[in-house]
Structures are given as structure tokens and as C-alpha cells.
Image (spheres, rainbow, N blue to C red):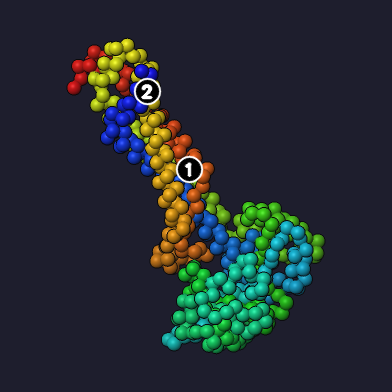
Amino acid sequence: MSIFQLALRNTRRETKRSILTGIAIGLGVATIIFTDAYIRGAFDSFLESFIRLDAGHVKIMPKNAVERTKPLPLDEGIKNLSEVIKTVEAIPSVLHIAPRLRFGVLLDKPGGSIPALGIAMMPSRETEFMDLQEYIIEGQLPSDNENKLLIGKKLAKELNLKVGDELFMVAKDAYGGFGPGLYTVAGITSTGVPSIDRRTFYLPLPAAQDQLAIENSALEIVCRVEGSMYASEEVALIIQSKLIEAGYDDLEAVPWQKQGMIYSMIEPARYANGIIIMLLAVIAISTVINTVLMSVMERTRELGTMRALGYGRRQIVWLIISESFVIGIISSIFGIILGMGMALWIQRVGIDFSAAMGSIDIPMKPIIYPEPRNITALWAAVYGVVISALAAWYPARVAVRMHPAEAIRAE
């Protein structure tokens, strides 16, 4: 009987031991697959929300605006907005652009006031970015030239507003005075980001320009570029050169990676993902080594008898490693089915963190959808097989160091 056939027989004979080792390997493989899928889903959810609701792939702003710790003054925004838009739209790698204006206000309510953020934009241009139509739960999207607004669900509830009501506000204009504005509530929105729905309203850009006394001006222009979001840095350089050629050297094109500390936060998190998976690997290895070592100790007399019958040290080592290798193959298949099955199922229903994220002021949807990858499943399966074989090496070395006569006499 060959060593491999003997290993197959032993895995069937020691059923409890084989199952225990197999569960450790299978759960390790499944955990790696699901953990990777979950973390990737969280990253993608965060980036998608950040790019759509705030950064775009590239954002055009006045120079040094991204380094400011305070909001950009209205009188320092992008002048000659319509001409800048024409310049940027002529660049082939820029697919869509949308001008925006952000300003803070205090909204009155019984018993006090509420700080809120107004986002002025062109609804017709926002379909590829902050597509408000999909967030409207009541009412409808206003046109580009209406004196109407959309208001976040939680903010509307605090102000006791419903569709059709009027909202009066006063905001500081570009000249330091106070510009009044009267708007009709066209719709109620729910973005899924609690911090946004609690403090944000949206209105057409021309209406905000009138109220804030900034004709043909905006504070930023967001751009969607050709290719993946990781092409944004290259396209930003192209946009920058075109702006300089057109005489707009007071503006800069900033890719999403350089807007604030977002990218610098994401990269360490990606490394943390790798560290977590490495820790899972260490735990799995220690479990396999422990179970295989216990198996070897229980089979001391059997292994001693094999040595006495003429089996060499190398054959004994290969026998123990082969047993773990067989268990590793079967367990890795089980781990793939379990890990991918869980990830695909939760990908459909999502994991809702609404309660935990209610007070987090970052543009991220509270429902995470894992994104399993076939390459991760393949890597995890190879890891399971290889680790199970490697983890058996030390117990195998322990076994062959015993003298056959002492091993046969062992209890």
C-alpha cells in the first residue's frame, strides 16, 4: 500500500480527528473569503458615496481651497462659471461636469434654530453624480430655474415641513450682508446617510446665486472622468493644463485622492485588511498544528510499529503530511462553499449599520454590501491546502524522533 493510500485510509479511520482538523481549516478559509468581501464592500460603499455626494472624480476649485480649514468665502469662488464649464467640457476624457455651491444657514424652529447646509446645484447636470431623483421619497425634483428646494428627511421633520410648504431663510451673501430667500419645498429626500439627511437641503444654483449675490459663479465644479475612478489623477493633470491655457491659472483640478484626508485614511485601512487576514492565517495554523500534534501523540504506538516494520523516517513524515494535505483539500472546498455562500447571500440583503452610524458625519451609506471575489476564494483555498500540509510538518518531525522500541512500549 502506498503512502498516499495509507493517508486516505487514516483520514477515514480517525473520523473525529479529521473532522476537527477539517473544521479549523474550513472556517479559516471561509473567514478569509468573507472578511475580504466585507472590507472591500465597506471601502467601495464609502468611496462611491464620497465621490457621488462630494468629491466627484476630479473637483475644480480656486487655488489652495482644498487646504483651507474654513469654508471658502463666496466672493473667492469660480468666476466666469459658464466659460470655465465650456473649457472643461471640451476635454474628451471628461464625461460629465456639475457646478456646486455650498453655504451655511441657521433655520428657525420653535424653541431655537438649526444649523443647516445648503447645496446649490443644477439638477439637470447631477444625474451622473448626486442623482437626487433616486433619493426623493416625497414630491419631485425642481427644475434648474425654480425657487424650490429639496430637504433632508430628518431636517424636514425637525422643522415640521412637508411638500408644498414654504421655507424662509437668511444667508450671508458675497458682500457681507444678509440675503433673504423664500423657497417652496418641492420634495423630501433620504440619501441613506443620516448626517446628511439631518442637516442638508438642496436648491437650484441660479436661485442660490440670486440670494447670495454671486452671479455666474460657484465654489466648485465636480467632474466625472473616462475610465475607472483611479484614472482621476491623470485626467486632473490634463484639466489643469487646459485651465492654464485658457487663462484660469487661479483654479486647480484636484482628484478625489487629494481632497482632504480621505485617501490617506483608506490606504492604512487596506493594509489593516491584510494584517487581519494574516492574523486569521496564524490562528488557523496554530489550530491545525495543535490537532495534528494531538493525533501524532495518540498514535505513538502505531507509528513506532510502522518504524519497526521498516518504514523510514521520510515515509512517516510524508504519511502525516499527506493526511493533512487530503483533509486540507476537502476542508478548503467546504470553506469556499461556506465563505462565498455567506458573502453572496449578505451581498443581496446587506448589513445595516444605521443605528451605529447615526452620528457619524461622513458620506457613507449605512448598509454595507460585501463584494466577494473569485481570486480571493482561489487564494484562500490554496492557502488552506498549503497551510494544512505545512502545519503538519512539525508534528511529523516530533513523531520520527521517537525510537521505535520506546514508541511501541508507549501507552
Please give left or right for residue 262 compared with residue 305 in the image: right
Residue 370 in view here: yes
Specify whether residue 178 is in view: no
The residue where tag 2 is placed is: 5
The one of 239 and 354 positioned closer to us in this rendering:
354
Q: Which type of secondary structure does the marked residue at label 1 adopt? A: helix
> Which one is in front, 261 or 140?
140
Q: Give 227 or 84, whichever is nearer the viewer.
A: 227
* 369 in relation to 108, above or below: above
Residue 397 is left or right of residue 193, and the answer is left
Q: Earlier in the sequence, mark 1 or mark 2?
A: 2
Q: Residues within 10 Å of mark 1 (few under 14, many from 20)?
A: many
| Residue occupied by mark 1 | 377
Q: Which quarter of the figure is the N terminus placed in? A: top left
Q: Residue at 39% x, 41% y: name it.
A: 334
Kind of residue indicated by mark 2: Gln
